[in-house]
Image: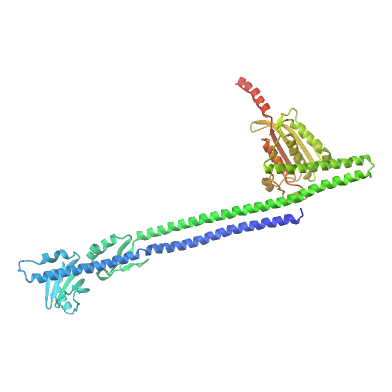
Amino acid sequence: MTEAEPRRTRKRRQAWRTIELAMVVLGVGLNVVGLAIGLERAGALRIHLIEQAKPQARQVADNAGSLFDEQVKTALRSVVEAHRLSKSLPDWMSGEALWASDVPSWIGALYVWEGQELTEYRPAADQPENLTETLASGLRRMRLTPNQVELIYQEVGGERWALALLRPPGAADMIVVGQVLPGRVKSILVEPLLALTKGLELVPVGESDQPWSQAMSGVMREWKIKPTAEFLSDQTHSAVWQFVSYFGLMLLSLITLLAAMWYLMRVTHREITLAEMKSSFVANVSHELKTPLSLIRLFGETLQSGRVRDEAKRQEYYSVITRESTRLTNLINNILDFARIEAGKKEYAMEPIDVGEVVRETYEAYRLELDHNGFTHYLTIEPKLPEVNADRDAIARAVLNLISNAIKYSGEECYLDIELRKDTRRGRHGVLISVEDHGIGIRPEDRAQLFDGFFRSTDKRVRTKRGSGLGLVLVKHVIDAHGGHLDVESRLVKGTTFRIFLPEAQARQAARETISSPVEKTET
């Protein structure tokens, strides 16, 4: 891979980070806009809910006015009839029984004016001395249409009286006067109508008109209808809850959308990364195949031509051909194994094996290359290692991949130490294989992807070495398939140690437990 390719990869990743940041900013921006719209809609909703009570207030005012007019007309007409009838009855008979039931309790004093004469039917509770003269002088100037009710306010004795006047049909010289008591009209006539509604009350005209008010007419014009504080609070709460529901749904939708976008971006990013890794894999494998094939062909043709007459030189050429053939075979086996693993068709021929013997054979196969590359190398095998139930070839390839990596990423200090010893992990006995080098080490940020297929670090020290990115994947799969554990310990520039734990064969493990059980019982 050229130096420009990692640069392009970095640019792509930076572009994806920019897109992800833009998604976050977009989400926050949409959230803020949604919040502002929600608050504005909540305010508008509150006003709308409060305005819904206006028609009820208007209806109450209209009904109160109509009911007032109707009851006044009925009461005053009954007084007219009683007055006319009283003229034809003996003095000892009272006409009050004829009209008293039709007069509402909010009408106080009652009078009948006939030209020059004022007849009093019900005196006022606190009647002023000059009441008769005041009414007579005022009523002389009144000109009413027959059957028309008119409400006037008259100053009588320093007090303001509300008077309802009616001119009966066919009696041009007669006017009936009733004193209206506004306080009683409020409690007897208007408030029962308000009780049928919800959230409305009567307040004096002097109070604020916020958020709105409905004026009353006639005798109640000093009062107005307004929504109650409890009603306003209820509508505010309703608007707030609807806003919270709206905003919650919007936020949930936004989170779902962002999560879906994030997941799509991640999947796309993963696919692009995988495509880049596969492309890099093809390029690296092509080079890995080309290099040993070229060397094999070059040295084979040189030997075939007979130009090399020195036996030591010929042996050197033979060793190069053998080494490159081994490397080529290992690469092809890795690719085939990975293909089988990806297809789910990889199978292992399990049998009890001597792990020490397998590792020794693998180590001996690489001894010449280790010496050729100037390595200081050691193999330490603890005696009487337990047998392991494993696939001989698979374990050999796993160890071979670790040795190959140690050679490839050796750095300045060429060192390799392979150690096998008995160990116990999680209550199971087995063999621990340690492969230690003093190479370039593994960066902490690469640990999470170390065993991912096709992965190769962006570290320049790694990029300078050719590789397929499959070796450690295969090692991990082999060890997992054998029920073992693979651990890695590494420090930059200080080297890396891979530790493979393989549990001993089950039959031997069971025999050991059987043998140890009676001893434990005896001690007990």
Horizontal side of 98 relative to 425 (left or right) equals left
Q: Nearer the viewer, residue 128 or 238?
A: 238
Instruction: Please say whether residue 393 is visible from this viewpoint.
Output: yes
- From the top left corner, tell me how far across and down residue 174 is, in percent: 14, 76
- From the top left corner, tell me how far across and down residue 201 is, in percent: 31, 62
Residue 341 sits in which quadrant? top right
Position of residue 186 relative to residue 256, above or below, is below
Residue 346 sits in which quadrant? top right
Residue 309 sits in which quadrant? top right
The number of callouts visible is: 0
Position of residue 50 relative to residue 167, above or below, is above
Position of residue 118 relative to residue 101, above or below, is below
Horizontal side of 383 relative to 260 (left or right) equals right
Q: Look at the image and name its color scheme.
A: rainbow
Residue pictured at 64% horizontal, 33% vertical: 426
Q: Nearer the viewer, residue 215 or 292?
A: 292
Residue pictured at 76% horizontal, 51% vertical: 283
Q: Quadrant where the C terminus lies?
A: top right
- From the top left corner, tell me how far across and down residue 151 is, in percent: 22, 73
Instruction: Please say whether residue 438 is visible from this viewpoint.
Output: no
Residue pictured at 37% horizontal, 63% vertical: 52
- From the top left corner, tell me how far across and down residue 232 is, in percent: 37, 61
